[in-house]
Amino acid sequence: MEPNRSRARSALALAALLGLAGATHFNRPKYYDAIVPRALPGTPRQWTYASGAAELAVAAAVATPRTRRLGALAAVALFVAVFPANVKMALDFRDKSPKARALAYGRLPLQIPLVAWAWKVAKASP
């Protein structure tokens, strides 16, 4: 596969992941409400909807060639910004089933390849 086509596919896959994640914030908000760090001002639902909207906006930016680089850089920032919620989830799931704990703990190192993927998309975009 030619390099430009491969880069475009990678960017569109990242956009799809972000779009799907953003949509779930509106379809299943209680799940996200539970992992919003309580130190944040406002209600967990406000943060759930705001982060979902941010993911949808970033997905649209990554999907559009003209805004792809900026969108991918925003994705890097977004993946870093949601890390505290993943830490809270891991801490909250310490007493859950082994499967639930594995999912919660697995989210922590998953942020690294997500950040790297978004960075790679940004670097490959004009």
Image: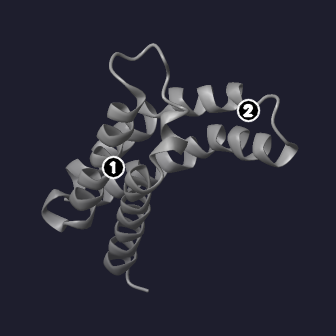
Q: Residue at x 40, y 76 (%)?
A: 6
Of 2 and 106, which appears nearest the observer? 106
Q: Quadrant of the N terminus?
A: bottom left
Is residue 31 depicted above or below 34 in this figure?
Answer: below
- Identity, as a three-letter code, of the amino acid under mark 1: Glu
- Residue tagged by mark 2? 93
Where residue 102 appears, as percent x and y from the top left, is 78, 44
Where residue 24 appears, as percent x and y from the top left, is 44, 56
- Identity, as a three-letter code, of the amino acid under mark 2: Phe
Q: Is 93 on the left-hand or right-hand side of 17?
A: right
List the single residue furthest toward the bottom.
1
Q: Residue at x 38, y 75 (%)?
A: 9
**Total labels drawn:** 2
Where residue 62 appears, as percent x and y from the top left, is 27, 59
Q: Residues within 10 Å of mark 1 (few under 14, many from 20)?
A: many
Q: Residue at x 35, y 47 (%)?
A: 52
List the single residue furthest toward the right.
98
Q: Is residue 73 visible?
A: no
Where residue 22 appears, as percent x and y from the top left, is 37, 53
Of 80 and 57, which appears nearest the observer? 57
